[in-house]
Amino acid sequence: MGKDKLRRFAENLTFKCLVQPSFEEIFHKDHPLKGRWNADFFGNDRPIILELGCGKGEYTIALARRNPQYNYIGVDIKGARMWRGAKTATDEHMDNVGFLRTRIEFIDSFFAEGEIAEIWITFPDPQLKTRRAKKRLTSPLFLEYYAHFLRADGWINLKTDSQHLFGYTNEVIRRFGLPCEVSNDDIYGTGYADETLSVKTAYETRFLQLGLPITYTRFSLGGMRHFEMFDWEEDEKAEKDNEEARK
């Protein structure tokens, strides 16, 4: 491990805005902040918005600057990356920003029923292999996690360069009949990107330089609590085979 990474890990321990629980604190149990983020962490009653897979925290920080009437929590497992966002929030004395270092698979241990007003998922790993479909952050498995703490009227925002993840997410929405406010396959090409959507992470800047269109989907769970997994890739293959057979 490099000296710079070690320095960041050490500095992370000094940031009051960064929560880093041990595995033992959350495995099959609730974290003490569950249901207490407003009272014990932020010290206010502003609605809380999550960014899942926040990386360096660019989106978390940008949204928090633009919207001081909300609290924001960036979630990721990479401590060396999160250092950037936590340091910025600390240096700028931002009282509406927090960071949580954990695996998103454990997210249910941290937030109580209705505690989260909205979710942002920005440029996650699309998990392209079929056997890793459950790992996609818009898979039925994860939607069921979110249903435990997202408000009934809360939105989920997905911004990605991956046409595969965009298509998969829209199929999830279609299959479960979820309310969908936006499904745009090229936010810059269509002129849809507003001030919020125009915030660019390091990943997005790289993708744009490669000429890749950036997609955006905004949907809600519509009050659903349970979601069954399905094999989209297998269904797509079967449909193509049927089309070939009909020719």
Image: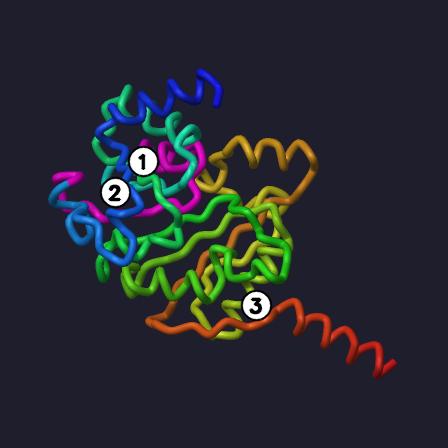
Identify residue for label 3.
171
Outermost right residue:
247
Identify residue for label 1.
64
Outermost top residue:
3
Residue flagged by tag 2: what amino acid is it?
Tyr
Residue flagged by tag 1: what amino acid is it?
Ala
Mark 2 and 1 residues: CB-CB less than 8 Å, in contact? yes
Circle nearer the N terminus (2, 1): 1
Q: Residue at x 76, y 73 (%)?
A: 240
Residue flagged by tag 3: what amino acid is it?
Glu
Asked if residue 60 is among those painted magenta in the image, a careful observer would answer: yes
Q: Position of residue 164 (x, y in %)?
A: 63, 56
Q: Residue 235 lies in what quarter of the image? A: bottom right
Return the mark for residue 70. 2
Circle nearer the N terminus (3, 1): 1
How far is the residue under mark 3 from the one under mark 2? Answer: 31 Å
Q: Position of residue 130 (x, y in %)?
A: 63, 62
Q: Position of residue 21 (x, y in %)?
A: 27, 41
How far is the residue under mark 2 from the one under mark 1? Answer: 7 Å
Return the mark for residue 105. none
Q: Is residue 29 left or right of residue 134?
A: left
Q: Nearer the viewer, mark 3 or mark 2?
A: 3
Q: Position of residue 42 (x, y in %)?
A: 17, 39
